[in-house]
Amino acid sequence: MNTSVSIFAEIPEELHESLKNYLEINPNWDLDRVFASALSLFLLQNHRDDTPQSTTHYRACARVYLETLFEQSQ
């Protein structure tokens, strides 16, 4: 089951401009895909725990990251 959760976040204007430019140049990407990829990569890089539950979350983040990274345009 794929569930989505909306996130409202304020980002620096410079980051917003860079993101807008990236999305204009790369039409296969959208805002949702960028945020899912970036957030999952952050969580993968900052994983510190080796409990069974943490390992499950780590694998889920890895799956989301790879799916968003290699997603084909529809």
Image (cartoon, helix red, strand yellow):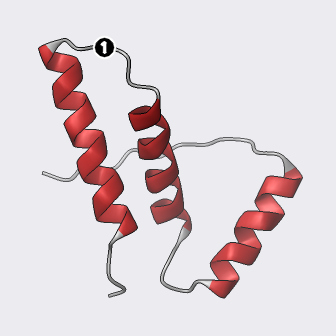
64 shown above or below 55: below
Image-quadrant location for residue 41? top left
Q: Position of residue 57 (x, y in %)?
A: 24, 30
Seen from the viewer's position, the closer of residues 29 and 47 is: 47
Q: How many marks?
A: 1
Above or below: residue 51 compared with residue 65: above
x, y (%) of residue 39? 48, 43
**Residue drawn at (74%, 42%) of the image:** 10
| Quarter occupied by the C terminus | bottom left
Q: Is residue 17 left or right of residue 26?
A: right
Disc 1 marks a residue whose amino acid type is Asp
Residue at 19% across, 25% down: 55
In the picture of the structure, the residue carrying the numbered disc 1 is 49
Q: 57 above or below 48?
A: below
Instruction: Residue 58 in the image: state x and y as whole percent.
Output: 26, 32
Structural crowding at the residue carrying mark 1, measured as other residues with C-alpha within 10 Å and reported as few (<14), some (14–19) or many (≥20): few
In-image side of 53 versus 40 (left or right) = left
The residue at the point 17 percent across, 18 percent down is 53
The x, y position of residue 8, in whole percent, is: 61, 43
In this rendering, would 15 be left or right of 27?
A: right
Under tag 1, what secondary structure? Answer: loop
Residue at the right extreme of this rendering: 14
| Res 48 → quadrant | top left
Q: Image check: 70 left or right of 2?
A: right
